[in-house]
Amino acid sequence: MLKTIAPILAAVGCAFTATAQDGLVYAYDLRGTNEFFTFDPSDAAAGRTFIDDGTNADLYNGFAMDFNTAADTLYFVTSDEDLGTISLADGSFSPIAAL
């Protein structure tokens, strides 16, 4: 059990995270797997639900992400200093403006 929870906690510790109103944590694993996923912090044993398995990995090199107040748009700032949104459906990045 501890071996199952430890990678999840490590991923959260190494990832940008944001919590939507449904209580799920959205996380991006920065350890080389480049996975964008969700998990329920009240039931970590249930595992992760992958939104992107690394397909859009080059898009996630960045600084921060956070939801708007309605928790339906996830904003992201890339290391190239672009502001955009990340699709909660497939993990794709849509740029809005250069910072």
Image (cartoon, rainbow, N blue to C red):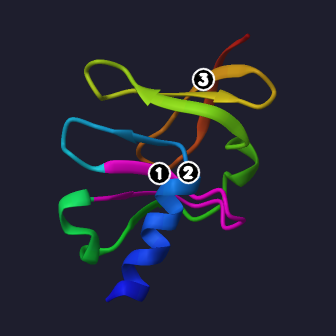
Residue 97, image quadrant: top right
Q: Is residue 26 magenta?
A: yes
Write down the residue under mark 3. Answer: 84
Q: Which residues are magenta?
A: 25-39
Query: Comparing marks 2 and 1, which lies closer to the viewer?
Result: 2
Q: Is residue 64 above or below residue 16?
A: above
Three-letter amino acid code at the position of disc 1: Ala
Disc 3 on helix, strand or loop? Answer: strand
Residue pictured at 47% horizontal, 56% vertical: 12
Query: Comparing marks 3 and 2, which lies closer to the viewer?
Result: 2
Write down the residue under mark 2. Answer: 15
Is 76 or 11 nearer to us in this picture? Answer: 11
CB atoms of marks 1 and 3 within 8 Å? no
Counting from the top left corner in percent of width and height, residue 63 is at 66, 33
- Left or right of 65: which side holds 62? right
Residue pictured at 20% horizontal, 68% vertical: 43
Write down the residue under mark 1. Answer: 27
Three-letter amino acid code at the position of disc 3: Gly
Mark closest to the chain's N terminus, 1 or 3: 1
- Left or right of 41: which side holds 31? right
Disc 1 on helix, strand or loop? Answer: strand
- Cα–Cα gap, marks 2 and 1: 6 Å
Counting from the top left corner in percent of width and height, residue 41 is at 25, 58
